[in-house]
Image (cartoon, rainbow, N blue to C red):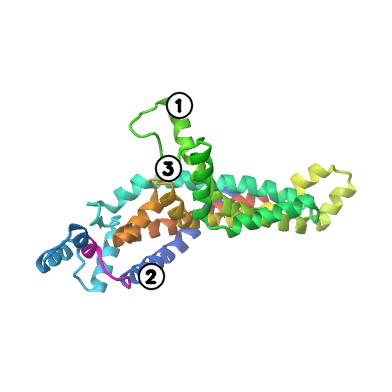
């Protein structure tokens, strides 16, 4: 019960601290977007081919774009206070509805990519730490450096050329077979085929980070006194590596993973555009091109909330990995 009370207290403190942080982020993002040239009325007029001055005035009046900046900010914050993210001029739908349609696909893609990155990165990092200074360590270090250095869009295009064009194993884009409703397990397999390439493209950059971090953390833990004590007790090398070294080395990795879960949305913009994946990243790109700032503000707000939630989960996970940390 004491542990549960500590967890509840920690979550309450996180929620209280999150409120001013989120408000500050919203206001900062609002003013930054106001510095961008043009608005949704300009884009809509450009797409239609022509527009009179009266039409432009009517569009700005309809979407509230003709008000002073401070009035627009007040209207937006007032809408947030009533749990409204505003209206999208480009799509003609409430922003919350648009985000609700795209959010599941992005969360699924980000979760799968983060899972792949953690699993592969930790395994590779463990191998690098075990064979530190030897050939496997050097080869994997070079491979990690390549994954870290190569742009994500280039990796995505190369994966499409290899697995879609040359081998024909996987689809090159989309979220499922068009025009076919496949029920049951076969439908899940069909959707999984479309997720392999985008999730892999998004994960490879983070694989390199987690592999290097796991290697460094394990080598540092290996030099600690409690590891030498475990060896003196006669524990097997496998048991020492898994239960003593790797478990303690996971603490900085989980911290970084919590930060990356929110920031992955930035990488998802590129990946979802390359693979035509219907998610928030692609929606953010379309919102920038269409000057649909209400949609962009909603996505940025959601990204901030994801980071805060991920950090709270990481705090609890670290308490499980190392009870000495405690939940303060």
The Cα atoms of the two marked residues, 2 and 3, are separated by: 35 Å
Residue 106 visible at all: yes
Residue 1 visible at all: no
The Cα atoms of the two marked residues, 2 and 1, are separated by: 46 Å
Residue 7: horizontal and vertical position, in percent?
55, 52
The Cα atoms of the two marked residues, 3 and 1, are separated by: 19 Å
Give the residues in magenta.
Answer: 35-43
Residue 181: horizontal and vertical position, in percent?
36, 28
Residue 49: horizontal and vertical position, in percent?
17, 60
Q: Mark 1 packing: few (<14 Cα in 10 Å), some, or many (20+)?
A: few
Q: Mark 3 packing: few (<14 Cα in 10 Å), some, or many (20+)?
A: many
The secondary structure type at the circle numbered 1 is helix
Residue 123: horizontal and vertical position, in percent?
68, 46
Q: Are marks 2 and 1 in contact (CB under 8 Å)?
A: no
Report whether 2 appears left or right of 132. left
Q: Which residue is mark 1?
A: 186
Identify the disc placed on residue 30.
Answer: none
- In percent of the image, x 42 and y 44: which residue is there? 105
- In percent of the image, x 21 and y 59: which residue is there? 44
Q: Magenta includes 41?
A: yes
Q: Which residue is mark 3?
A: 173
The secondary structure type at the circle numbered 3 is loop
Quadrant of residue 55 in the image?
Answer: bottom left
Q: Mark 2 packing: few (<14 Cα in 10 Å), some, or many (20+)?
A: few
Q: Which residue is mark 2?
A: 28
Q: How many marks?
A: 3
Q: Nearer the viewer, residue 303 or 49?
A: 49
- In percent of the image, x 29 and y 71: which residue is there? 37
Q: Nearer the viewer, residue 8 or 293?
A: 293
Q: Magenta includes 225?
A: no
The secondary structure type at the circle numbered 2 is helix
């Amino acid at each position: 019960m004491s542990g549960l009370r500590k967890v509840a207290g920690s979550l309450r403190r996180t929620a209280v601290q999150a409120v001013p942080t989120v408000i500050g982020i919203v206001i900062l993002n609002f003013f930054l977007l106001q510095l961008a040239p043009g608005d949704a009325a300009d884009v809509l007029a450009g797409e239609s081919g022509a527009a009179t001055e009266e039409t432009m005035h009517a569009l700005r009046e309809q979407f509230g774009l003709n008000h002073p900046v401070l009035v627009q900010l007040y209207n937006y914050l007032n809408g947030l206070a009533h749990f409204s993210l505003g209206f999208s001029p480009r799509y003609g739908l409430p922003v919350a509805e648009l985000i609700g349609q795209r959010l599941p696909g992005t969360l699924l893609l980000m979760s799968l990519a983060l899972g792949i990155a953690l699993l592969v990165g930790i395994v590779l990092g463990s191998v690098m730490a075990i064979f530190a200074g030897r050939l496997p360590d050097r080869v994997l270090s070079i491979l990690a450096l390549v994954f870290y250095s190569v742009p994500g869009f280039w990796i995505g295009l190369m994966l499409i050329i290899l697995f879609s064009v040359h081998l024909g194993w996987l689809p090159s884009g989309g979220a499922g077979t068009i025009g076919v409703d496949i029920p049951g397990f076969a439908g899940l397999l069909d959707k999984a085929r479309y997720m392999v390439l985008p999730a892999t493209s998004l994960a490879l950059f983070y694989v390199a980070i987690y592999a290097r971090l796991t290697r460094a953390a394990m080598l540092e833990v290996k030099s600690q006194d409690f590891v030498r004590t475990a060896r003196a007790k006669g524990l097997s090398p496998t048991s020492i590596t898994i239960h003593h070294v790797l478990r303690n080395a996971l603490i900085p990795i989980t911290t970084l993973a919590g930060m990356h879960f929110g920031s992955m949305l930035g990488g998802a913009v590129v990946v979802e555009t390359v693979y035509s994946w219907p998610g928030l990243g692609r929606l953010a790109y379309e919102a920038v091109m269409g000057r649909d700032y209400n949609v962009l503000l909603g996505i940025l707000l959601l990204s901030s909330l994801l980071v805060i939630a991920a950090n709270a989960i990481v705090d609890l996970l670290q308490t499980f990995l190392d009870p000495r940390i405690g939940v303060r």
